Image (spheres, rainbow, N blue to C red):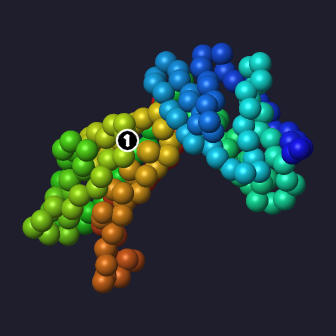
């Protein structure tokens, strides 16, 4: 028989509904629902009368790291479904005015460094992207999806073959993960 020891426990906010089925955690609140698969042989998550308990059957660095990651993932899920997250990015150019627009689930970056063909960045999940002047705003309830979308936009404007200290054009993250 496996002996499980509690690594951490924390309260579930009252405005959040939580269910755990087969290592899949479903969190829903006033802004929507987020699901995450939390599967490991030595770490598990249990729901016990309004509290979440993260338990481990081994005491080593790997299990401790996984339990800490899961705890922060769960807290981000709670915050996302109650308050939401917002990222702000800045469009930076020196000579060629870069135009950024959103079409469907892609962000189009046109006239970047004077290029004729537009660069594209994929929007992940239910992330809302809006462009206002030289700022790009990303809103959503899943912090992981927002971060991945922001990295796709930043990666689409990566410059190769030039000195990055001189050619600083691109779209860069200003603030990340702030609450709305």
For the point 35% across and 82% down, which residue is it?
Answer: 163
Q: Residue at x 43, y 45 (%)?
A: 146
> Residue 133: where, in percent of width, then height?
25, 44
Query: Is residue 25 visible to us here?
Result: yes
For disc 1, the marked residue is 125
Compared with 168, 66 (above or below) is above
Q: Position of residue 43 (x, y in %)?
A: 75, 47
Hey, which quadrant is residue 115 in on the image?
bottom left
- In this view, 173 is above or below 164: above
Residue located at (28% from left, 56% from top)? 121
Q: Do we see residue 76 in this rendering?
A: no
Q: Is residue 91 above or below residue 128?
A: below
| Number of residues whose C-alpha sits closer than 10 Å to that of mark 1, classed few (under 14), some (14–19) or many (20 or more) | some
Q: Residue at x 52, y 27 (%)?
A: 81
Q: Looking at the picture, how far across and down is residue 171, in whole percent?
A: 33, 58
Residue sitting nearer the eye, 58 or 68: 58
Residue 136 percent across, percent down from the top left: 32, 46
The residue tagged with tag 1: helix, strand or loop? loop
Residue 117 picture quarter: bottom left
């Amino acid at each position: 028989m496996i002996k499980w020891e509690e690594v951490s426990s924390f309260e579930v906010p009252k405005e959040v509904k939580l269910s755990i089925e087969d290592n899949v955690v479903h969190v829903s609140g006033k802004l929507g629902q987020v699901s995450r698969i939390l599967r490991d042989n030595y770490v598990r998550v249990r729901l016990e009368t309004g509290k979440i308990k993260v338990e481990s059957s081994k005491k080593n660095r790997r299990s401790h790291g996984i339990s800490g990651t899961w705890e922060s993932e769960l807290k981000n899920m709670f915050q996302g479904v109650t308050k939401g997250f917002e990222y702000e990015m800045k469009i930076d150019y020196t000579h060629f005015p870069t135009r950024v627009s959103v079409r469907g689930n892609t962000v189009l970056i046109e006239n970047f460094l004077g290029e004729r063909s537009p660069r594209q960045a994929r929007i992940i999940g239910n992330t809302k992207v809006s462009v206002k002047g030289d700022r790009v705003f990303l809103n959503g309830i899943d912090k992981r999806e927002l971060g991945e979308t922001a990295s796709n936009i930043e990666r689409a404007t990566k410059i190769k073959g030039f000195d990055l200290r001189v050619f600083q054009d691109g779209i860069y993250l200003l603030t990340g993960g702030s609450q709305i």
